[in-house]
Amino acid sequence: MMYEAKWANENHTAVFVEFNGVWEVDDFERAEHDLTTMLSEVGHRVSVVVNITEPRPISMHVLENVRNLITVSHPNRDRVVMVAPDGFLQGMQHVIVRAFGGNAPRHLHFASDLDSAERVLNH
């Protein structure tokens, strides 16, 4: 499995989803399912941190699944923070903004490292 989804803290107020290695469409589908299951386990809002530590060349099919993952429609989903190295992150921002008709969703934030992601969550 090229991803891991786990609670980021004991209060279950954030989920940490990390992708490593070569990603397949199935990985995103499983991550989306796991994320929905985790969000359903609690009765409060949960932020999601999607950490892409080893960016790889990706296909449009994978990009569509990234879009699906960050837009998981669940009443407990709060902010989503995408974490990736700067160059990759800029490309992802461009693709995601285009996928949403020129505007990224208000719940979506971008960070170049985990410290920046934590600042977004604590703000």
Image (cartoon, grey):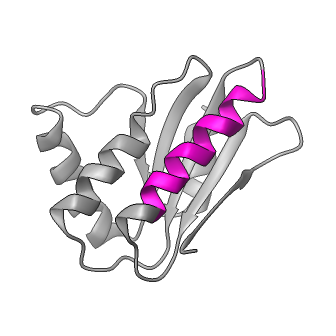
Residue 103 position in % (x across, y down) = 18, 30
The residue at the point 45 percent across, 25 percent down is: 73
Residue 9 showing in the rendered view: yes
Q: Quadrant of the C terminus?
A: top right
Q: Quadrant of the N terminus?
A: bottom right
Displayed quadrant of residue 69: top left
Bounds of the magenta span?
Answer: 27-42
The residue at the point 66 percent across, 37 percent down is: 37
- The relative height of residue 31 versus residue 20 in the rendered view (above or below) is above
Predominant SS along the magenta part: helix
The residue at the point 51 percent across, 77 percent down is: 20
- The relative height of residue 36 versus residue 29 in the rendered view (above or below) is above
Residue 67 position in % (x across, y down) = 31, 45
Q: Does the magenta stretch include residue 34?
A: yes
Question: Tag count in the figure?
Answer: 0
The residue at the point 77 percent across, 30 percent down is: 41
